[in-house]
Image (cartoon, helix red, strand yellow):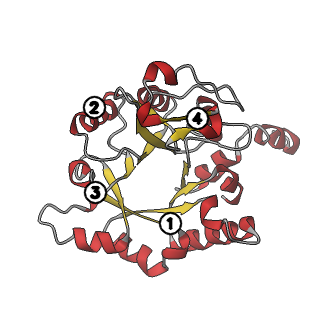
Amino acid sequence: MSFKTILFLLSFISPFSVCLGQSDLKLIAHRGGIVDSTYTENGLPALKKAAEAGYAMVEIDMRKSKDGILLANHDANFSRYYNSPGKVAETNWSEIQKLSSKIDQNVPLKLEDIFSFCQSNKLDVMLDNKIEGLDITLFNQLIALLDKYDLRKNALMIGTEESTEFFTGKVKLSCTRKQLEENKKSKDYSPDHYFLFERPANLSREDVLWAENEKIMVVAAINKYHYRNETDMYQHAKSDCKKMQTYGVKYFQIDSEFGQFF
């Protein structure tokens, strides 16, 4: 095979695929996929792009409608993408289905539809639980859905204080190191129940080594919100990505525009 032929074939390979094929790095697409000025957060087009790019996991923002339907939406209302001031928790699913995103015509998705897509496209899920209170019936429905689509084994959750006790041992929950050290005092503690989740500014090399010794998964968050006050957001994010990799971090929850640094 000629050198030109090799270069031609490589041109069809996603840069994420090359990266992940050469290492055990796992990238988690923040806010439901590859999200930019042309794709709605938690939308089907964004999910499809993440699957095509070779992400290992997508982070989904979980809410419920007024009539108890589990769906994906980051904000508490539908203003930003759907030009609707209505709050998610105060709107029935029949009305939510009528909404259309102003940038890609996405309609808000049921969580089950996202799970089905993830199973079909070999994507794991990280859930950001934005549901207030302890709704045991609804949360049992969530567990059943994760099981139905074979997603629970590798699922991660950014939880709430109210729901922590319910989900402990059912889904791997995010913690700071301080929380993990406190959890270790529990007689039912297992490192498989949790993962260490921090932004690079709060994650030291010693923290990563400690988690490794404790057999606790580490996920670094590289999100635009953390760099909102920086004069050079991208240079700072690039530096953090490199630093976390030198520490031995393998899992990164990222805003997709930072994927170039992997």
Residue tagged by mark 2?
Answer: 141
Find residue 194 and report its image quarter: bottom left
User: Which residue is located at x 55 percent, y 52 percent?
Assistant: 27
Tell me: residue 233, above or below residue 46. below
Three-letter amino acid code at the position of disc 1? Val
Q: Nearer the viewer, residue 55 or 102?
A: 102
Residue tagged by mark 1?
Answer: 249
Residue tagged by mark 4?
Answer: 47
- Distance from the alpha carbon under mark 2 to that under mark 3: 22 Å
Query: Dot 3: within a 10 Å radius of its alpha carbon, few (fewer than 14), some, or many (20 or more) residues?
Result: some
Three-letter amino acid code at the position of disc 3? Asp
The answer to whether marks 4 and 2 mark residues whose Cβ atoms lie closer than 8 Å is no
Query: Dot 2: within a 10 Å radius of its alpha carbon, few (fewer than 14), some, or many (20 or more) residues?
Result: some
The answer to whether 102 appears left or right of 74 in the picture is right
Residue 14's x, y, as percent? 70, 42
- Distance from the alpha carbon under mark 1 to that under mark 2: 33 Å
